[in-house]
């Protein structure tokens, strides 16, 4: 669809969502996108401008096609990915997912099996246009002892293609005593390693969070937490995490994923929690596809709620809000392909992110890049020419037909295509 050659190149008549670039046409007005020519030199964006008809450089006329920065997928589970065919969820519930994953991990998760599926996931994400991924890792038992060295090996092998970060995923009691220090040391010994936990309103409390925040502080680690992945009204782990972050004056980054139960709180209480989250500087990741799949499921019954958190209210309060793939073709979510444009399209439909789209395109690009400590993810002069070029000219066209795209990394279009599922057979 697109061809690019040489160390210098011009992408003519590119439309960039206004939320994803600081560039504005001289004298131009507002709008959801800006149109300009993108000059690429030596793998970076050299300029954004409107060039005269003859630039003297090789050119590709995008004819108003949209250009996005490469995606960042800040919440995934690469070690679980693509086990659906051998470990389907028996009833589509959260409990069924836990049962199926536990049995599959004990039966099949050798280093070779996990590496093969992780490499397939990284290749899928890369060819769809993702340049950064954070994965949560089950670290119980033998798998936990193998997975940290495996992640470090994959970080080295995929450097320059996908920046890979990893989070220890455990129940909070795993941080008790010597075991907690051991987990923290393993995370600290991994570039981009951090601590995580599965927190609910009923299993959290000050003592749990003080121990977790203390380990993170002592080992210089950020926190990325699974929080309130349920539909229970009442006390939330999210408000407890916000209080702990403020109590500890925590200097690291804190991200909370899911936060589903915020959407079933009374409106005034939900607004108060959102304000506390924003004041504490906590980022929130909504996982719309997985939560739509799992939450409020009962045999023979229609779900009554969408399972996602209050993304508009959190954003209005000033919190960073992001979207991510979460589970892909495993018992927690039967579908997906690590395609962040598909994730964004699902989020638009589920959470009503349109009319207008506003800043929401940054929720799968610049905001997670910044939260991962990888720059601001914007299309600007000096930034890496890591781009996704779409044939679509408008957001409506893009979300209706997102597949016609080319991925540009370091100023060159990559030739790879997503790997075939047959490779996993």
Image (cartoon, grey):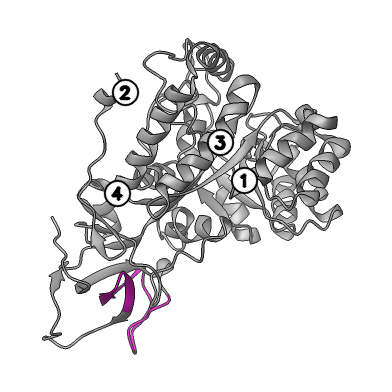
Can you tell which mark lies on residue 424?
A: 2
Can you tell which mark lies on residue 93?
A: none
Rounded to the nearest angstrom, the CA distance separating label 3 from label 2 is 22 Å
Q: Is mark 2 on a helix, strand or loop?
A: helix
Q: Dots 3 and 2: beta carbons under 8 Å? A: no
45 in the magenta segment: yes
Q: Pick the residue in front: 315 or 48.
A: 48
Which comes sooner in the sequence, label 1 or label 3? Answer: 3
Mark 4 or 3: in front is 3
Which comes sooner in the sequence, label 2 or label 1? Answer: 1
Q: Is mark 1 on a helix, strand or loop?
A: strand
Location of mark 3 (residue)? 149
Q: What stretch is highlighted in magenta?
A: 22-46
Location of mark 4 (residue)? 399
Rounded to the nearest angstrom, the CA distance separating label 4 from label 2 is 29 Å
Q: What element carries label 3?
A: helix
Quarter placement of the C terminus: top left
At x 31%, y 79%, the residue is 48
Location of mark 1 (residue)? 193
Rounded to the nearest angstrom, the CA distance separating label 2 from label 1 is 28 Å
Residue 337 falls in image quadrant: top left
Which comes sooner in the sequence, label 4 or label 1? Answer: 1
Could you say where residue 356 lies in the image, as x and y percent from the top left?
41, 60
Mark 3 or 2: in front is 3
Q: Pick the residue in front: 117 or 285.
A: 117
């Amino acid at each position: 669809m697109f061809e690019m050659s040489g160390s210098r190149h011009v992408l003519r008549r590119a439309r960039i969502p206004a939320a994803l670039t600081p560039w504005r046409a001289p004298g131009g007005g507002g709008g959801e996108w800006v149109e300009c020519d993108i000059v690429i030199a030596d793998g970076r964006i050299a300029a954004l401008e409107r060039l005269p008809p003859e630039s003297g450089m090789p050119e590709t006329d995008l004819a108003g096609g949209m250009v996005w920065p490469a995606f960042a997928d800040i919440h995934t589970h690469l070690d679980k990915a693509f086990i659906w065919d051998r470990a389907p969820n028996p009833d589509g519930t959260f409990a069924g997912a836990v049962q199926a994953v536990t049995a599959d991990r004990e039966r099949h998760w050798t280093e070779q099996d996990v590496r093969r599926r992780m490499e397939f996931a990284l290749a899928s994400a890369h060819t769809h246009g993702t340049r950064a991924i954070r994965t949560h890792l089950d670290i119980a038992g033998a798998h936990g002892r193998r997975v940290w060295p495996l992640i470090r090996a994959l970080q080295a092998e995929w450097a320059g293609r996908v920046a890979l970060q990893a989070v220890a995923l455990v129940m909070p009691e795993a941080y008790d005593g010597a075991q907690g220090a051991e987990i923290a040391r393993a995370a600290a010994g991994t570039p981009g390693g951090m601590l995580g936990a599965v927190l609910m309103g009923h299993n959290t409390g000050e003592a749990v969070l003080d121990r977790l925040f203390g380990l993170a502080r002592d080992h210089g680690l950020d926190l990325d937490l699974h929080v309130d992945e349920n539909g229970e009204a009442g006390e939330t782990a999210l408000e407890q995490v916000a209080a702990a972050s403020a109590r500890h004056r925590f200097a690291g980054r804190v991200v909370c994923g899911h936060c589903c139960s915020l959407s079933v709180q009374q409106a005034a209480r939900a607004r108060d929690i959102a304000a506390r989250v924003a004041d504490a500087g906590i980022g929130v990741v909504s996982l719309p596809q997985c939560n739509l799949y799992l939450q409020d499921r009962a045999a023979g019954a229609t779900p009554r709620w969408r399972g996602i958190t209050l993304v508009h209210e959190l954003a209005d309060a000033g919190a960073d809000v992001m979207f991510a793939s979460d589970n892909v073709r495993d018992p927690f979510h039967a579908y997906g392909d690590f395609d962040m444009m598909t994730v964004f399209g699902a989020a638009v439909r589920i959470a009503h992110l349109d009319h207008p789209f506003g800043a929401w395109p940054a929720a799968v690009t610049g905001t997670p890049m910044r939260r991962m400590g990888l720059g601001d993810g914007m299309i600007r002069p000096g930034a890496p020419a890591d781009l996704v070029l779409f044939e679509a000219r408008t957001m409506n066209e893009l979300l209706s037909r997102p597949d016609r795209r080319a991925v540009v990394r370091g100023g060159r279009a990559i030739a790879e295509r997503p790997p075939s599922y047959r490779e996993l057979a």
